[in-house]
Amino acid sequence: MLADKGYDGDTIREALLPQGILPVIPPRSNHLAPAKCDDRAHKDRNRIERMFNRLKQLRRIATRYDKTARSFLGFLCLAAARLWLPSFVNWP
């Protein structure tokens, strides 16, 4: 489970571990016994969160104009491709 510092708590970690879920939660600065966190996985979580925020800037996705889930998913795929395309293609 990838989460931010707001979910740092011993009860949450103890509930996840018996289910076989490895929590990746950075410790708060005031935590007395900070647990270790996989920084690489946490950076990946941040990249995914930034991508969702960029997608939500598009009005059609933020307000969900599409009536069906299928058309919404199709437009979501188009919007994601539009955002990712400049990183793969050299534009003049």
Image: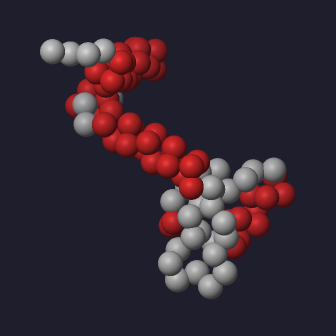
Q: Nearer the viewer, residue 75 or 64?
A: 75
Q: Position of residue 8 (x, y in %)?
A: 59, 69
The count of marks equals 0
In this view, the residue farthest toward the left is: 92
At x 79%, y 58%, the residue is 17
The residue lying at 53 percent from left, 74 percent from top is: 28
Task: Indicate whether 32 appears above or below 34.
Answer: below
Query: Is residue 72 visible to us here?
Result: no
Q: Is residue 11 left or right of residue 67?
A: right
Viewer-proximal residue among 25 and 18: 25
Is 12 on the left or on the right of 55, as rendered?
A: right
Quick check: 46 left or right of 40? left
Quadrant location of residue 50? Answer: top left
Whether residue 22 appears in this view of the structure is: yes
Image spot of residue 40 (x, y percent): 57, 49
In depth, the one of 35 and 11 nearer the eye is 35
**Percent of width and height locating residue 1:** 64, 50
The answer to whether 49 is drawn above or below residue 36 in the figure is above
Residue at left 44%, top 42%?
47
Residue 7 placement: quadrant: bottom right
Q: Position of residue 19 (x, y in %)?
A: 81, 52
**Residue 71 higher or lower than 24, as above or below:** above
Residue 76 appears in which quarter of the rendering? top left
